[in-house]
Image (tube, coloured by chain):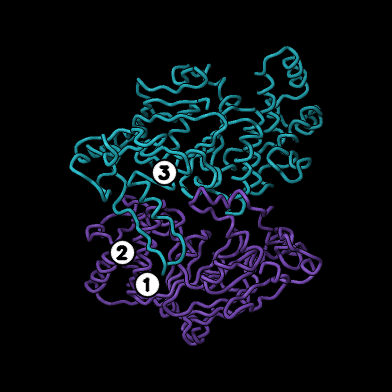
Amino acid sequence: MAELLSVKDFVVTYKTQWGNVRALDEVSLSIEKNKLVCVVGESGCGKSTVALSIIGLLPQGASVADGGSINYKGVDLSSLDEKKRREYRGTEIAMIFQEPLTSLNPVYRVGDQIAEAILIRMAREKGKGAELQTEVMKNSYDSRSLRRPSRLKLRSSMPSELKDEVVRALKLVRMPDPEQVPERYPFELSGGMRQRIMIAMALAEKPALLIADEPTTALDVTTQAQVLKLMRGLITEVDASILLITHDLAVASQVADRVIVMYAGDIVEDASALDLFSEPLHPYTQGLLACIPSGFKDESQLKPIPGRLPDNRNPPEGCKFVTRCPYAMDICHKKRPRLLESRPNHRVECFLYGE
Amino acid sequence: MASEDQDVLRVEDLRKYFVIGGGLNPFSKKEKFLRAVDGVSIRVPARRTTAIVGESGSGKTTLARAVTLLDAPTSGRIFFLGKEIRKWNAKPRELYRNMQMVFQDPDSSLDPRSKVKDSIAEPLRSLIGGDRKSTYNTVLKSLEEVGLPEEYADRFPTSLSGGEKQRVAIARAIATHPKLVILDEPTSALDASVQAQILKLLLDLQTQYSLSYMFITHNIAVATYFSDTIAVMYAGNVVEYGQTKSVMTKPRHPYTVALVSSAPLPNPRIRNLLNVEIVGEVPSAIDPPSGCKFHPRCPYAEKICTDADPPLEEIAPGHFVACHFVDKTA
């Protein structure tokens, strides 16, 4: 399969008032075309930092060490300056976040917000016809001028082609009532509908890679099921890859082609969903699976992982999981294991499977 | 089946309405009610766990707050340890010695400026009394019970992890040796591995202290694992109620069926999530649909569902369902 994006030896350090924290410790991963890859891990493992590194939105105070690279369609994104990088955001790589209410602008109608994404995509698309069309639309409808109070006039002047595009974007995410919804404000919509708007906005730019950071964590289970089902279907429908960040292994097992498990800034295991769940290799993955309650309490035992996460400011010398690992050996205390392909297409960072 | 006097808590037809609207105009006719809990009857047998599951807005937390009299119920009766309790005649010292609560977010339920020992000692001082030494000993014992070292007594909540804070909240709840502990989403803010630790701790404490739990959660897998009886709530009503095993192995209300199939299984070979049929979302509690509140989302809905709210009926011993067409899910 064709590779869309690959991250190599990426190191990110956050400067905090208590010292430097290594959020990503030589992380390498790749995303293939038309696949759904899940990054799974507990809070603080660096899964969101992976997402922010790829889209280039790391917060202030984060520093990227030399030697790492993010290769997207033959270009090293991490070497680009901010202006160049910006051209990739949206139309090449788009991102949706956990809480749609904080990512949507509360004072704009959702239709205007989706239209803005469509205009950006049109402006970037090559071809004279498209440019001309964008110019015409921009003259009659400029989302930036929405800041002025004459909103009523502006809304009525939204060109009908643009309006059709907005409705089409909403239909793509199976929005009920797609003709009326563009007129609403975010607060008038439910959580599931808001997340659909976010997905519609991201897809309106026709990205090749969609990054979703915990998109269903704030949603109810029946809504979560609907949104995940939608995202899974989109891969073939809009020809995109999806990188899904989640803390929930069960969610990953349901939708992912490939699952990457992270622990304390490291990728500890990387395998196809079928392999990872039928034969988890890393003791941490095994422990996480044993933490998921299944069945009834008189039939099965919960086996919590003892201990707590290591301090990322000064992690243990050897394997970061060593203090909690039931199989810890001498070498685990002394040497950091490397992420190796110990089974076909199944990488694991553990000395149990050879050096 | 446990007989009625063995129930620690029995709730009959409890309602909690909130008045909304009307604005500042006292003559406004626009006053409306938000029916957060709309006629709920449940029981918590002694030394057992009753789980209340439902999605946000289903009324589970309002039910907990009404049962603990933190918010006075609008109507209905609550029997605790065989006696009816009401807001106006409750003796708080007596009541809360036997009924304690653990909340979802320990950051907001623990005082950031109190040391751990002071937080745990608070209910002991106000509900039981006794001298400083015996209080302090009980604090240390509670800390030990929840698996925290003694030196944590002098620390502040900010220096603890999420799981440790929740342990402190549990230590505070069990310090007075209550009969009933109401757990409102106690593990929802925690990571998977910490959640497993806390659930195991709660199960151990239950046997050790003969506790009864009312366990509120939105997580079906956790509720199934943790509880003995389960009540499924939807828009303020209990739609299905019974032994956890019979409800979860053979759910009969169309909503329970949807809820169970929406809960992701950790198995990529059974992709239940991608076959989910349910559409729409939980209705507003201010203008709920007529008749059965689930009918706009229900695959079996017919005319009668829009006209009449189905009562909770016993379909098998101890298994209650509120649905006009319960035969269709058989």
Question: Residue shown at 72%/67% (left/top)?
Answer: B292
Instruction: Please give the residue where the numbered disc 1 appears in the rendered image.
Output: B206
Question: Residue shown at 48%/87% (left/top)?
Answer: B5
Residue A311: in sight, yes or no?
A: yes
Q: Observer-nearest residue: A10 or B158?
A: A10
Chain colored cyan: A
Contact check, label 3 and label 2, Cβ < 8 Å: no
Q: Colour of chain B?
A: purple
Q: Position of residue A192 (x, y in %)?
A: 63, 47
What chain does mark 2 sit on?
B
Vertical relation: B156 (above or below) B206: above
Q: At numbered mark 1, what does the secondary structure look like: helix, strand or loop? A: helix
| Disc sitting over residue A41 in the figure | 3
* Viewer-side label of 1, 3: 3
Instruction: Please give the residue where the numbered disc 2 appears in the rendered image.
Output: B146
Question: Residue shown at 50%/45% (left/top)?
Answer: A252
Give the farthest residue toward the top: A128
**Residue A97 located left or right of residue B99:** right
Question: Label 1: few (<14), some or many (≥20) within 10 Å?
Answer: many
